[in-house]
Image (spheres, helix red, strand yellow):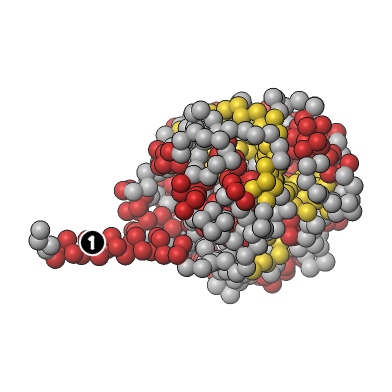
Amino acid sequence: MTTSDVLVQDLRVLLAQKQLPGGGWAALSSSSQPALEPTTLACIAFGPEFQSVHDRATQFLLRIQNSNGSWPVFLGDNQEGSWVTSLACIALHDRIEAIPEQLKGFAWLMDSAGEESHWLWKWKFRTTDRHVRFDPDKFGWPWVPHTNSWVVPTAFSILALNRRCACGPDAGSSRVELGIAMLLDRACPGGGWNAGNGVVYGVALAPHPDDSAIALLALTQRRQEPTAQVSLDWLERVAPTLSAPWSLAWSILALAAHGRPVEFLVQLLSSFLDLEQIEDNSTLAVACLALEYQRSLAAFGVTA
Amino acid sequence: MSINRRDLLIGTAAVAAGASVSLPFFKLQYNTVRRPARSRVAVLREESYSHGIGETLFAGLQLFPLDVRGKNIIVKPNLVDYIAGAAINTDPLLVVAAAECFRRLGAKQVIVAEGPGHQRDTQLVLSESGYAPILRDNRIRFVDLNRDELIQVDLRASYTGMKRLWLPKTVMQADFLVSMPKVKTHHWSGVTLSMKNMFGVVPGSRYGWPKNILHWNGIQQSILDICATVPVHFVIADAVMAMEGNGPLNGTPRWLRSIVLADDLVAADATCARLMGMDPSRIVHIHEASKFLGNSCAKLIDQVGEAVRSPGTPFQVVPEFEFLRHWPSSPWTESSPDELAYQCKDK
């Protein structure tokens, strides 16, 4: 057993201890409010082979789905829907009993779009609001309804719809293509992605490692795109310097998905992962995913 | 002059558009008036960030009748992102100094809390900006407001029309909340000071990174709704090294060598605006907030620190906010003509 294998076991034990009685996980260890992001990531990290924990997490996800097919950010949130719907669809992918709920989730994702897709806002961004540089014809998904498309919710939605599209060509493919076009349009000039636009007020924004990594995960079918290559080169340079497990873990997943070497990054993550200090359950789950990156990429529907 | 049908249509559309933008500010949009009769502000001189900053701050806090004994205090810095060499965050030395001062004054607990607006990886922002080691060394707990437990709160103003927001339990249950902004210009709101700093309490996990819903509902309006709802008890503004130009991330560092303390966030922001060479009455959220939240009129502010004048050259701003700089340099205790026309006129 390698060091990282032992660490994965420890991480799973720790995560299992933090699972709330209702089957979900809170965002922070100090909280008892079940939230969707840590729950979906933990659900993917455990996989169906850890039946008890996975079953309880699955039941929690199925129980709190909104009637419109979306998922709320946390238990008790409003019913309109949010960005975590894509993560819930990915987390439920291998559960046959959850196919109806997944289909409702996919349908909601198909209806959801950044507000810049509306003709009025397209006109605004083309005429009066020119401080942000982007093409409003290329839109993806917002964090919450009635706002712009952003990189992370768009990337997760592409990953979710790709899993649906894997069953055969359907209307989801065109939205995926549009989402990919949006990601390519909004990359930072030197590679990588910020939260949204790459340029504001004529100034190139600095890329964020985690946003860039998640965008690159969604672009594995476009790995020959110059934007993807430049961004991969940037992430490969930056990853060894990262001092936080969340960004490093996402970087490992993205680089592995594009066939770049990551073993030394896995060792780096293992070396500074202080389990006692990490209060954020999503970070614990993503660290677990990164340490078992080959299995995790399959769960995201990504082939290296 | 003849007006044809096309002119009339365009004119009507223009009037309608103008009305839709300006009408919200003519309607009464706050539930209660919480403006104190008078406010107190202290401008402290501080040459640079050093370990002596704590003594300066402690002496400054003595100028206020603060009783924080036994209270749970939340210190909310402006921690947005990290860019090497850029003065974008409240300096960690000042934040830790504030925590230590409140401990010396008998606080039960001091927590530093923030929800970075641009970066999802809060731990990365903390470590890259120098916060992580200094908080750890001083045994100060940090709460990530982007991921804290949330409670639904009815807004106490209706500038955005949002009615309610999910806000962090840590902030809403604090006994004493301190806004610690970095004094900067802002390309969407003109300035970002103690009021705009409260955007950081809006949770990213619920509303996204950045908190785009606040932009869609109007930045100035959102500032007003949040500040009407979240009770800020004190302000410690970092104006030692400020930022001008294309803030809040890509501006230019500018030394002001000051720390601004205040028991009223509107008075704090009005004073900071004057230190930047700007007319606070022309900054929409300060102007509106002075009707119900606090005092911006210099006549209503007891200045208990050093007398500091506005700079010879006002802060650079993006072209859209050039009008903020038109107030001629004068002693900071004076009010501009625009100010005299509103808040000061009845005093």
Is A232 located above or below residue A97 in the figure?
Answer: above
- According to the picture, the residue beneath numbered tag 1 turns out to be B11
Which residue in the rendered view is the most extreme toward the left?
B2
Query: Viewed as shown, does residue B122 lie left or right of A198?
Result: right
Residue depicted at x 46% and y 56%: A114
B250 vs A85, nearest the viewer: B250
Query: Viewed as shown, does residue B10 lie left or right of A288?
Result: left
Residue depicted at x 74% and y 43%: A287
Q: Position of residue A178 (x, y in %)?
A: 41, 51
Residue depicted at x 54% and y 53%: B344
Number of marks in the rendered image: 1
Disc 1 crowd rating (10 Å Cα; few below 14, some 14-19, many 20+) is few
Task: Note whether residue B138 is visible.
Answer: yes
Residue depicted at x 44% and y 58%: A115
A219 vs A73, nearest the viewer: A73
Q: Position of residue A137 (x, y in %)?
A: 36, 51
Which residue in the rendered view is the most extreme toward the front?
B347
Element at label 1: helix
Is A203 located above or below residue B41 in the figure?
Answer: above
Query: Viewed as shown, does residue B342 lie left or right of B13?
Result: right
Task: Note whether residue A279 is visible.
Answer: no
Say which amino acid is labelled 1.
Gly
What quarter of the picture does the C terminus of chain A occupy?
Answer: top right
Chain designation of label 1 = B
Is A235 located above or below residue A85 in the figure?
Answer: above
Q: Position of residue A117 (x, y in %)?
A: 39, 56
